[in-house]
Image (cartoon, grey):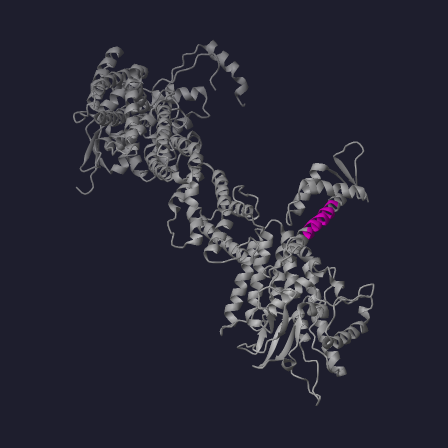
Amino acid sequence: MSNPKVIVISSDDEKFPVDPKVAEKSLLMKNMINDLNPDGLQEDFEIPTPNVRANVLAKVLEWCEHHKNTIFPDDDDEDAKKSAPVEEWDKNFLKVDQEMLYEIMLAANYLNIRPLLDAGCKMVAEMIKGKSPEELRRIFNIVNDFSPEEEAAIRRENEWAEDR
Amino acid sequence: MIPSGSRRSKIRPPRKSLVSSSLDGSNSDPTVDFEKSWSILSSAITQIQSKNVSNLSYEQLYRKAYVLVLRKYGAKLYDNVASLITHHLLVRRDHLLAISDHEDFMKAVILEWDEHLQSMKFVSDVLMYLNRVYVKEHKKLLIYDLGIELFKDNVIKHNHDEVGRKIVDIVIQEITRNRKGEVITTTMYITKLINMLELLVESAGTDIQYGENYFQTMFEPTFLQNSETFFYNLSQEFVNYNLGSRYIREAGQFIKEEESRINFYLPSSTYPKLIDLMNNIIIKDKIDDIISLPYEQQGLSYWLQPVLGNIFDDRQSTHHLAELRILYELIGRFDSEYQLLRLRLKENIIAQGIQLPEFVKTSLQNAGEKKTATNSTAFATKWIDTVLRYREQIMKLSAEAFASNPIVEQTITYAMRDFINGSGTNRKNNISVNAPELLSVYMDYYIKQLGKPSPSKDISTSSSDSTDVFVNRSIQFLRYIKDKDAFEANYANHFAKRFLNSKGASQTINANNKLGVDLEELILSKLGEEMGTTSLDKIIKMNKDIKSSKDTTAEYKKHISKNQKQNLVDLELKICNVTDWPKSMTKDYKSFSKSDTGEVSFLWPKQLRNTIREFEEFWFSGKKNDNKSLYWSPKFGSIDMRITYPSRTYEINMSTYAGIIMLLFAPQSSNADGTMVSAFDEQKELTYDEIQELTGIPEADLKRHLQSIAVAPRSRLLIKKPMTKEVNNTDVFKLNENFKSPSIKVKVLTVSASSSAAPSKAKQKTEQEEEAEEVQSNIAEGRKLEVNAAIVRIMKSRHTVRHNKLIEELIKQLANRFQPSIILIKQRIEDLIEKEYLKRDDDDKNTYHYVA
């Protein structure tokens, strides 16, 4: 075959053939490809990902495809990662419902796609920023397990930090 | 902002449980989950270690590890992996120890290492999640690095470094075999093993670059120790050859090989340590002994021998350049200043140099030369020539063996200076040379040679070339002379003699040199450049006299022709100021004129008296000569006389004395018709005593000049009865009718003082000895004055000076001229204190003050 492809298989056995370059955005897949094909890819190579569903996998691979030529800053460079804002395209890309967002993040964690994971985390951080506790409980579906006295005590302690 | 101390609210996962969906559905007992997963993983790892990966699912293994980490089993997983690998390695270790053959062992170790690294990489990749999350968080070693450490601890270091030591010993053995010249097949293994040892970091968790590694802690010290012993034994072996050349060659060879060996095997950090060791033991410790080996055992003196040999015998072409080059390189390895080489080289050059006078003397004798005294012309020219040739040879050697290194060449110059100026005199060899004198003799000889009109047709280029060569060589040699003031005194002496004794017109090289530059002038200007004109003071004054003599002669000639004086002899005047010319020549200047008592011992012949009177009139007519007295000196100069012999009329040039003697035989009487009777018809005969009375010429000179014109075969103007070589008081002289000469122009050479067998040698000092004495005393006087002047100069600028400092300064200032002795300096200081130029400090004897 002229251009061997990497075929990523979702938990529901759906096959997604991609260019090796795209797949290698995931360090896990990259190592797998290289370790099991030390002389280079001769033919199509299948990678099963049983803990990623098809629709999530599709999104992840879409992201990889879009960024297949992007060069990301060094993995160890903490500062760059913290300060860099989420790219416009990534922002739009991640405008999905919460569940999908979390699944994408878990998949990115599993597959070891650092930039995607970071982008996801930043999105969530945006969601948290500037929200009141009630809003946060609503968004994240958090059960309030404080008794009214405890809650009042906490509010009093933290009054100084509020900028009203 | 997490409120301090209070309960934190947990962010519970959103509705759907995502994590559990990634497991195989079951949320059952964690312990069972771990063991199950672990058994799969551990068997997988074992498979990997056996290079049996085909049946494994990478993804599955990865997922298992992922889950375990999520379930907080990271630590347990990590530790289990560590012990699994440890067990595996211990088994491999036993396997290794079973191998006895060295080469097989080395090969096996490397194989184990390579395979281990490979499997560790795989394991590490599979456990990537563990690495990323657990390891980073708990600051443990990455799996791959863990693998390396486990290898180090369980294979190499286990059981008191059992394997480790074996590796070190075997590697060192192989290297030793290689050093001894054996061909080994394990070169690549050595390199690889050393690389492996370098990767085994000792302190856990640190960077390989900064931490110590096994190579450094175990291998290097043992290796260096072993090498030191080996080098020592090797150098001893070389020394026992007792042959310098062999030591040099073999040591050089070994060092070259060792360097390439080390370069190949060892890390760059060890390289300098080993090289230093090698340099110190093989070269530094031994090389002085080698250099100083005597000639038979081929030390430095043997290698330098051709330099000496090649001066006299061009056929001897065996040079020991190879050995010298190696020596230079070896010493350069531990001393960039080559101090030892320079020291020994200097010793050897001086030793060779002081043999040169002996060689020169022998070679002169072999050539049949009779005059081989150390201040004879023949000796002087040959010695200076030889020294300059020696210099050529040694410089060539320096270029080829020492890369013309400037510090080495400087040492050579110092050494040559030492032996030329006689400070390295060998007591056994009693030929010492007076370099300043010899240079002056050398120059004197060549100046006279070059001044003679050249007989060859092609005059212009060849003689100006040889002039340049001569001048350059003289200046070159001058630079080696320490006591420049001694040279100046000698040169002044020769210079005066050349002028005063010259016959005929002043010797310029006009005919030969198109530019018409006076050779003497040329040399004086070159000497001035070299030594400074103040040191040539005397000679410059004499030169002035020479010039003004020429001017006076010209003026006189004009005066004569203007006033149309007749019957006067043509005069070429040499007027010398008595104070400036050497006393040995001028000391008796008054003895030829009327003494205070009116007595005259010397008589000018009547034919010359007119001329003398005429010139004196002319001389004193000039106002500038009012307070000067003129004394004629027949000792010097020459007369050109036309004598008609029966065979032919000749124009003869002879010394003044000889001329005066000849004039005695001029025809006295005239014929009846007024013409002069031929002198031959007169048949005049005079005895020695009569001649003595009639002329008043001093005895020694008279005898000498009579020999010139009556004994010397080509210039026998007179016949002497009896025809013996010596002139006795009873001899009778008359004109030689049969005198013949092939050319019209004849030059009578004055017999030299030493060869005229003077019977009364004992008491009277010869002229030569007198001159020599005068030169010496001139030098001594000159030095006194110069030291005085220097002391005053120094004191004037510093006002107060300590004794030692004064001496230091003096020696520095006078270095260009000569080396003052401490005694001389002390004398001069005392002298100046007496003359109140300085005084001693009242409290401190060692301090002087300037007295304005």
Highlighted magenta segment, given as a residue range: B777-791
Residue B504 seen by the camera: no
Look at 75% across and 44% down and name the residue there. Answer: B797
Vertically, is B556 above or below B799? below
Quarter of the image for the N terminus of chain A: give it.
top left
Pick the front one: A92 or B183: B183
Residue B39 seen by the camera: yes
Look at 66% across and 68% down and name the residue there. Answer: B688
Name the residue furthest bottom.
B673
Quarter residue B281 falls in: top left
Pick the front one: B767 or B788: B767
| Residue B781: percent from left, percent from top | 71, 50
Vertically, is B175 above or below B519? above
| Residue B196: percent from left, percent from top | 30, 27
| Residue A137: percent from left, percent from top | 40, 19
Quarter of the image for the C terminus of chain A: give it.
top right
